[in-house]
Image: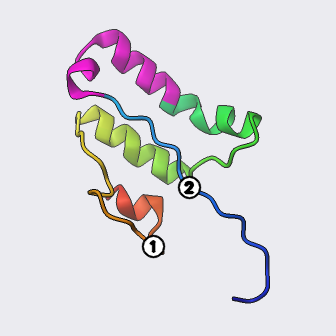
């Protein structure tokens, strides 16, 4: 460590059931959330993900790809973008 202060952080994920995502109003809400999340997150003092991360999540939603990206394991030193590949 360099002696610099690095606050602890963790991502906040929203999980959507595949069956629910098949409902048009749920899909519209999720897409609204993903289009506006960075701005809304910053407004409440949280740190938004990178635009690339939001882009990758939007791709997962469009493909209706479900499942945890961590696979039930801890990931140290891995970026959100790497997890979403």
Q: Which residues are magenta?
A: 17-33
Identify the residue at image location x=67%, y=49%.
47
Left or right: residue 20 compared with residue 80:
left
Is 2 included in the stretch rendered in magenta? no
Q: Mark 1: which secondary structure?
A: loop
Q: How many marks?
A: 2
Disc 2 residue crowd, few under 14, some 14–19, many 20+, Cα 10 Å = few
Earlier in the chain: of badge 1 and badge 2, it is: 2
The residue depicted at 39 percent of the width and 48 percent of the height is: 56
Give the secondary structure at mark 2: loop
The residue depicted at 56 percent of the width and 53 percent of the height is 50
| Residue that extends furthest to the right in the rendered view of this protein | 4
- Residue in view at x 72 percent, y 65 percent: 7
**Quadrant holding the N terminus:** bottom right
| Residue 31 lies within the magenta run | yes
Tell me which corner region of the image, top left, top right, bottom left or bottom right, holds residue 9.
Answer: bottom right
Q: What is the x, y in percent for residue 65?
A: 23, 39
- For disc 1, the marked residue is 76
Q: Main secondary structure of the magenta part?
A: helix
Q: Tell me how far mark 1 sits from mark 2, CA to CA.
A: 11 Å
- Within the image, what quadrant is residue 59 found in? top left
Q: Is residue 8 above or below residue 84?
A: below
Looking at the image, residue 48 sits to the left or right of residue 80; the answer is: right
User: Where is residue 16 drawn, in percent x and y?
Assistant: 33, 29
Q: Is residue 75 above or below residue 48?
A: below
Q: Compared with residue 15, is residue 51 higher up or lower down, i.e. above or below? A: below
Q: Position of residue 71 (x, y in %)?
A: 26, 57
Label disc, if present, on residue 10 of the rendered structure: 2
**Front in this rendered view, residue 8 or 52:** 8
Q: Position of residue 6 (x, y in %)?
A: 72, 71
């Amino acid at each position: 460590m360099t002696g610099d202060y690095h606050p602890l952080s963790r991502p906040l994920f929203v999980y959507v059931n595949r069956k629910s995502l098949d409902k048009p109003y749920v899909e519209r809400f999720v897409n609204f959330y993903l289009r506006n999340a960075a701005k809304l997150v910053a407004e409440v003092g949280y740190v938004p993900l990178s635009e690339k991360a939001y882009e990758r999540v939007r791709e997962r939603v469009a493909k209706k790809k479900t499942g945890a990206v961590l696979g039930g394991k801890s990931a140290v030193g891995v970026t959100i973008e790497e997890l979403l590949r």
